Amino acid sequence: MNTPLVGGRRAVLEAVRAGATREVLVARGARSTSGLRDVLEACREAGLPVREVDRSELDGLAADHRGIVAFTGSPTAIGERELAAWPFGPDDLVVVLDGITDPQNLGAAARSAEAAGATMLVTRTRRAADVTPAAIRASAGALLHLTHARIANIARGLERLKDAGFTVVGLDERADRTVFEEEPPDGRVAVVLGSEGEGLGRLTRDACDLLVRLPMRGRVGSLNASASLAAVLYAFVLPRKVEGS
C-alpha cells in the first residue's frame, strides 16, 4: 500500500486492536463521541501515542478521515509457499477472491469474511485489488486482522488448500444446486468468490470440490460480491460449524 495510514474511527480502532498502528492523530477540537472515546481508550491500553493536530493537517493525509488518522505498518501478505505450509486449525474457514479488482469490494468482502470467522483471505497478485487505505476503511479494519495470502495462480492455490484437507466451495450462478439444496461440508472449508462481471474463472471453477448458487427470488438477477459472500457464509457454511461446536 502506498501510504501507510487509515482514516475513520472504526478503521482506526480496529487497526489499534490489531497491533498495526504506530501513531494516531486526532483533529484538535474533535467532538467526543463514543467512537472517539473507544479509540482513545484502546490507544491508552496499547500504549500508543495520540497527537492532536489541526484538521487541515488531516485533510492533507486522508480525504475522509472523520477527525482521526492512524499511521500503520504496511500489511504483509504471505505467498504460495507459506500458504502450503500454514498451520490451519481443524475447522478453519478460508475465503478466496478470484479477480476482485475494486478496493471497496475487497474491503467489504474482507469485512464479511472476518465477521464470519475466516482465518485467511486469499487473493491474486495480478488483476486484483491491493490492500489500500480505501480497502482498509471499507473493511472497517478487518483487513488488518485477517492473514492475507497473495498468490499468482488461484487454481493452484486451491489445490494447495485441498492438500491441506479443505473442501473448496465455489459460488457460481450457473451451479445446479442452491446453498439450501447442497449438503454443507464438515471440517476445513474454503469459499471461492469470482469477480462481479465474470464470476469464477474456468480453471478456478474446475478446481472446486462443489459449486453452489444463491436462489434469486426477486427481479434483480444477482447480489454484489460482498453481499453474495456474506449470504453463502451465513446460510451455508456457518450453520454446520455452529452445529458442530
Image (cartoon, rainbow, N blue to C red):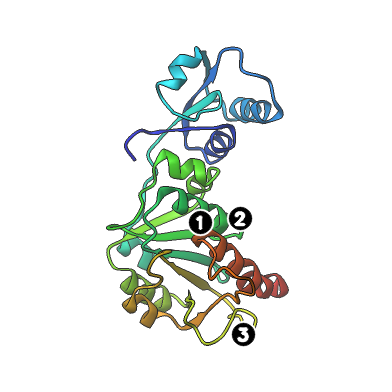
Disc 1 from disc 2: Cα separation: 10 Å
Query: Observer-nearest residue: 140 or 50?
Result: 140
From the image, state whether disc 1 or disc 2 is nearer to you.
1
Secondary structure beneath label 2? helix
Q: Quadrant of residue 218?
A: bottom right
Residue 163 is situated, as x and y percent measured from the top left of the image, at 40, 78
Identified by mark 1, the residue type is Ala
Question: Considering only vertical position in the picture, is 206 above or below 26?
Answer: below
Disc 3 from disc 2: Cα separation: 23 Å
Q: Residue at x 55, y 52 (%)?
A: 111
Q: Residue at x 49, y 27 (%)?
A: 69
Identified by mark 3, the residue type is Glu
Residue 160 is situated, as x and y percent measured from the top left of the image, at 36, 73
Q: Residue at x 53, y 41 (%)?
A: 18
From the image, state whether disc 3 or disc 1 is nearer to you.
1
**Do the residues bearing badges 3 and 2 touch, measured as CB atoms within 8 Å?**
no
Residue at the disc numbered 1: 109
Query: Which numbered disc flags the more N-terminal residue, 3 or 1?
Result: 1
Query: Which numbered disc flags the more N-terminal residue, 3 or 2?
Result: 2
Residue at the disc numbered 2: 115
Q: Residue at x 61, y 60 (%)?
A: 116
Q: Give the class, few, some or many, for how many residues have Cα within 10 Å of label 3's Cα (few <14, many ≥20).
A: few
Query: Observer-nearest residue: 35 or 161?
Result: 35
Q: Give the class, few, some or many, for how many residues have Cα within 10 Å of label 2's Cα (few <14, many ≥20).
A: few
**Do the residues bearing badges 3 and 1 touch, measured as CB atoms within 8 Å?**
no
